[in-house]
Amino acid sequence: MAQFEKVIYTAKTRTSGGRDGTSRSTDGRLDIRLSSPGSQQGGTNPEQLFAAGWSACFLSALKLEASRMKLSLPADVAIDAEVDLGITDGVYGLAARLNVHLPDLPPEVAQRLTAAAHQICPYSRATRGNVDVAVNVISSRTPKA
């Protein structure tokens, strides 16, 4: 277990019922129904929550690295996260793709920025070596007239 010099934040939730239950945070800001992937029931699933959390965290890491590199991020920077739940040899596992949209940045700059963010993002660090991850940079630089 990691020994932090300083804990910045601790998320606290209580989940009951598993994939077909509910999850609530102790501060009341999160109160959701859960459902299994592909279910017709209302609610979200852990893979969607993981994708949302990781993409939000990764975008913050991009902003931090852009600031360090003295770069301005495009206003429409976005991350499409895809998290797969699968089975191999009877054991459940995850795989993920982060599609990082950095329009109007030169491809080499977008690649360097994304690689740096992937090194510092806590979700990326936590999954490294445990989850098959592809980070794809989508940079559609518009030529200047």
Image (spheres, rainbow, N blue to C red):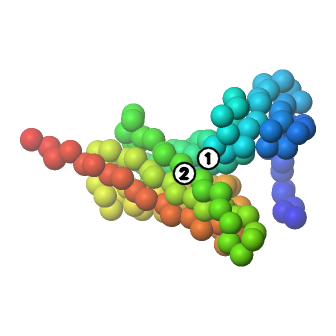
Q: Residues within 10 Å of mark 2 (few under 14, many from 20)?
A: some
Name the side, left or right, on which 55 lies relative to 24.
left
Q: Give me the residue at 77% from left, 29% from top.
A: 32
**In the rendered image, is residue 85 in sight?**
yes
Between 83 and 10, the residue placed more toward the observer is: 83
Where is residue 78? Give x, y as percent.
45, 41
Quadrant of the rendered image containing residue 9:
top right
Residue 32, above or below 78:
above
Between 96 and 115, the residue placed more toward the observer is: 96
Marks 1 and 2 close (CB-CB < 8 Å)? yes
Q: Give me the residue at 60% from left, 68% from top.
A: 132
Residue 137, above or below 16:
below
Tell me the SS state at disc 2. strand
* Type of the residue with mark 1: Ala
Q: Earlier in the sequence, mark 1 or mark 2?
A: 1
Quadrant of the rendered image containing residue 103:
top left
Name the side, left or right, on which 103 lies relative to 79.
left
Q: Give me the residue at 9% from left, 41% from top.
A: 145
Between 113 and 13, the residue placed more toward the observer is: 13
- Residue 51 numbered mark, or none: 1
Name the side, left or right, on which 60 lies relative to 21.
left
Residue sitting farthest toward the front? 40
Q: Which residue is mark 2?
A: 82
